[in-house]
Amino acid sequence: MTAEPPSSSFRPAIIVGAFWTLLFSWLFYDSELQNSPSLTRWEFWQNIPFLLFDLLPGSGQAGGLPTGWSYFAPRHWLILTAAFIACAAWSIGRLALRGLKLTEVSTRLERFVLSLAIGYAAISLLTLGLGLTGLLNGLLFRVLFGLVVLVELGLTAKTLAKNENSHKAKISEPWILPYELMMPIAVIGTFLACMLLGALLPSIDFDVKEYHLQGPKEWYLAGQITFLEHNVYTSFPFLTEMLSLTGMLLTGDWFFGALVGKTVLMTFAPLTAAAIFCLAKRWFSAAAGWWAVIIFVTTPWVYRVSIIAYTEGALMCYLAVTLLAFDLARTQFINVQFAKKMWLVTGFLAGSAMACKYPGLISVVLPMTVAALFVCVKKWTAETKSVPVFKYAMMFIAGGALAIGPWLLKNTAETGNPVYPLAWSVFGGDDWNAELQEKWKDAHSPSHHSLSAIPHDLWNVVSKSDYQSVLLFAFAPLAFLAIDRRKVILWLWIYLLWLFISWWVFTHRLDRFWLPLIPVACLLAGVGVDQLWKSRAKWLSFVIVAIAVVFNLGLIVSTRTGLNFYLADIETLAESSIIQPPGILTMNQSLDAHEKLLSVGEANVFDARFRLAYNTVFDISLLEKWCTSSDGEWLTETEIRSNLESAGITHVLVNWSEILRYRLTYRYTDFVIPESLDRLIDMGILSTPEPLTFKFIKKMSENEQREVGEKLSGRVKEIQGESGLITNEVYRVIP
């Protein structure tokens, strides 16, 4: 890593910075993990050697499953399919930049970053458009992607031919990796390899299998994107989920296509890292860029969202790439032809952040809009009054509308509310009511706004979060040591502060919702490490970074950050209880193709290989809808039976464990209680239930025991001499 020679003496600021780094590092490792309050990071260190030893390749067992390099072969075609999608995205993005005549202004790496980010968003919009028109056809996508790749490769070859002499001169020189870059590239490569292996594993996370992948699966099976009234989450902007749907179309299989989609989403991590490097190099130095990339890639949170089909990885990426596009537009402000097009690209990338998830509005769109206005006002001087600032603003807005507009139009057409289910009090919305709105608001709003809680919540973010890295905030304050760049650093800190405050004020404060601040913090931390590296405290920065890299590597390969059976047989793993919920696993083994299940309480249904009806906790209960009238009165036996027959329901699965969890968190309809199911049995509509799983009462929390006693006592049985709750049971619909 290239660095300037260290200074000859310690500056007082360096001493203070070094002290802060040591103090914060000690407090960080001494902190109890947020989800494991009895375990500190110091105590977790004793597991690191064994975790890293288990990472060594070989054959054997993992979780009782066969594992080894022989099982890696089936993953090759998944990687190649994901690479095909990435190549198509890059080609589409390059063609877009060519059409805008923006291919010669930035560096090659910057053009690559912009191209791939634009291309992914474009593929998402293409999939949405074709899906809404019923053209979800795998062959069509293969042909379209193949054509754009061939066209761009042809244009690239033509460009290279024009510069043949200079190109030959470049490739004739031996390419040798600088010695100082070998170590950081090895570190980055190790973490990216773990991300790739993790992304190729089936999902185990609830939200992923409830809607991030379940929605695309339903659309893939239907051959069309439609309104899913039983899954409100699928009305969110679905930029990343469209990439998973694209994977399903290209593979012709919803399960393996989901793995392709996860692999594509994993590539947002190195893309974000490249954007961070570009920003650091533009604003600070290449050395600061390398440090920032190392810090970002080795952050456990980045690994976690890269192996799970969450949207935060893409959201972080579009934040970083929007910053890059913004800086390109800002620095070329006087070049009217370039600036107008660059503001269009900036708006499109900012809108793509919101297309990942609604919070992108407050983390990217709003701050970028304010920054753009600030730049325009500042540049509106006597020398630049001829610049069409209004047109710049319109281009920025047009770009944002192009990215997020189709999702808002889809919701408007389906529900009458462009941001359904949000802002129901303003826009209303079909298939929604005051009761559902109140439930949604309670679950997705902050529990309080007590200012006294901010220090505690801030400390949880910077230190106690399970997947946080010590490097971010041990070094970010040291960025102010870069005296000549303090203005940029101050703006980055203001942005970082906004990202925390907006998370605290506007969201329900889940950890994942503050992740957009990670790229900004990594930029600052990279500058901080570089400043310490240039001083006589070089050894301190090296030791802290090295310790963090080893610790974070041990953490990400543990089960704490997700499934870690990197070389297990995928098909065997997919059929195991590790992946499938107990009720779904049982029904996969027992239901025939002509039978259909109504799942009550259980919304973790992605692994279901049978026909299915279900609803999420925030949607109208299908069981209640089919058994009661609009005023809540029970329907007659004939009416209920007719509703079930019309829906084709032959079995009913009830997950009382999930219903119990919902009652203590998001609330669940009071209709679904044991007495309601017993009444259907008495009517002769349902058979006596077959218990599938149970949980001893003594192993439940006090709140759970109280709720069981009040609402679920009808499913408490004597099991092995102790009281237990039947957690899963299945009923057969009697003809």
Image: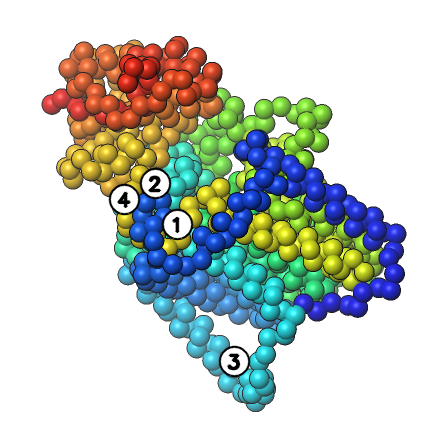
Vertical side of 692 occupied by 303: above or below: below
Q: Earlier in the sequence, mark 1 or mark 3?
A: 3
Q: Residue at x 38, y 61 (%)?
A: 79
Q: Which residue is mark 4?
A: 575
Q: Residue at x 70, y 64 (%)?
A: 287
In three-dimensional space, the C-alpha distance between marks 1 and 3, rounded to whole angstroms, equals 45 Å
In three-dimensional space, the C-alpha distance between marks 2 and 4, rounded to whole angstroms, equals 8 Å
In three-dimensional space, the C-alpha distance between marks 2 and 3, rounded to whole angstroms, equals 51 Å
> Element under label 4?
loop
**Measured from the top left, where is residue 732 in percent x and y?**
17, 24
> Element under label 1?
loop
Vertical side of 237 occupied by 428: above or below: above
Q: Nearer the viewer, residue 2 or 233?
A: 2
In three-dimensional space, the C-alpha distance between marks 2 and 1, rounded to whole angstroms, equals 11 Å
Mark 4 and mark 1 residues within 8 Å of each other at the beta carbon: no
Q: Which residue is mark 3?
A: 159
